[in-house]
Image: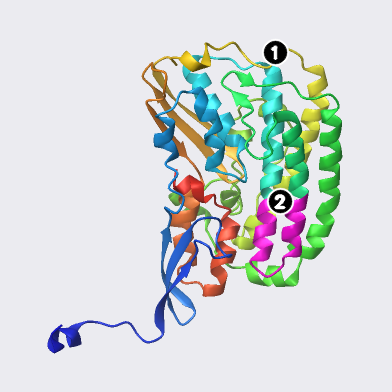
Amino acid sequence: MRAENYQQQSHPPSNQFELNFGPNHPGIEGNYALQVEVEGDVIVKARADGGYLHRGFEKLMEQRLWIQNISLVPRICVPDPSPMEVCYSMAIEEISGIEVPERAQWIRVLQLELSRIAAHLFTFGGHAATTGMYTPMYWGVADRDLILDLFEEFTGGRIYSIYNLPGGVRRELPDGFLDKVSEVIDYIESRLPEYDNLFFRNAVFIKRAKGVGVLTQEKSLEMGVTGPNLRATGLAFDLRRDDPYLVYDKLDFEVVVEEAGDAWARTLVRRQELLQSIRIVRQVVAALPDIGGELRAPIPNPLAWRVPAGESYARVESSKGELAYFVVSNGGEKPWRVHVRGPSAMHAVQVLEELVTGGRVEDVAQTMFSLDACPPEVDR
């Protein structure tokens, strides 16, 4: 390089440099990365960096039979997989005009709310670890395992249940299962005061979370933020209440909100939502013994099923926010087009980049875990 050209080049100040969070950094959620430019310890620019999973779920689904995708979609969000298979089934049911039996709808709600509880417990642990508190992380994993035990008993799988089919669910609940559900949720509810003392009311956590990653309601709506992250800005919007599906319109629960819109508020919303999920599960447990009928509606041979031509947009309220499937059928044995509207695709990219910029290096992990994203949704 000629000397005069070298001298004309601009060089960053000596206190400006780049840092990589992830893809194997403990302060990042899963196989994901965030590249930041800092001046001193202040972040001046951030860029989300996905692609470490290379799943390509949407295109994979278009190469498989309709029924085969039931075993694929739960992998789009491992901590909360149940909404994936329920929502995908709902999209096919809408195109095909299939009416799901009432008992199957109640069982689906049971599965969804147990999955929400397990997901929130997992998130609490990971979030606590960002401030150096590892005991809540161990607690969260251990208590979540009790929910996974229930999934294993009634679906056959601990993580990937593959329990739903277009038209209903695969099998009946085992004898005595509802009593076990009651025991587990009673235990988890009894544990919450301990979580409060160790984590939610911990002075270290409050100091680290309050005022960090502040997201206004106006900005949230502009960017398409949903779920607990939106409700933490004071907007009480929840699909289970505002656009009910399955039997949520028959259930009594509250939509929890906070006002501050920071990492602290987002965590408190999830803590209170866990209680509301327990409340819903108890209502389902009480109602199911009196609800009879079939577990699924008749469907054609799954291996030669040609779903009628048409399209549908099905959505549910997952633990991460609004999850939706846009499915198009051209009358063939495979989907012609599938698009997954996962909440993490926004929360882990645009929102994360926005919130960490101008903040400090030590708050990156705090901000990301408070957004509670699923990286596979980004690489869908």
Q: How is the image coloured?
A: rainbow
Which residue is disc 2 drawn over?
121
Instruction: Please state the extent of the stretch shown in magenta in the rendering.
Output: 121-142
Q: Which mark is residue 263?
A: none
Asked if residue 59 lies left or right of residue 165, the reply is: left
Q: Is residue 310 above or below residue 23?
A: above
Q: Is residue 303 above or below residue 324?
A: above
* Rendered image quadrant of residue 380: top left
Q: Tell me, yes or no, if residue 224 can be seen here.
A: no
Look at 51% across and 26% down and name the residue there. Answer: 68
Going by the numbered disc 1, the residue's amino acid type is Glu
Residue 281: image location, x then y, percent: 76, 35
Asked if residue 180 lies left or right of residue 167, the reply is: right
Q: Nearer the viewer, residue 38 or 162?
A: 162
Residue 107: image location, x then y, percent: 71, 26
Q: Quadrant of the N terminus?
A: bottom left
Is tag 2's residue or tag 1's residue first in the polypeptide sequence?
2
Which residue is disc 1 drawn over?
294
* Mark 2: few/some/many CA within 10 Å (<14, 14-19, 20+): many
Look at 51% across and 14% down and name the residue there. Answer: 97
Please tell me how many numbered marks the rendered image carries: 2
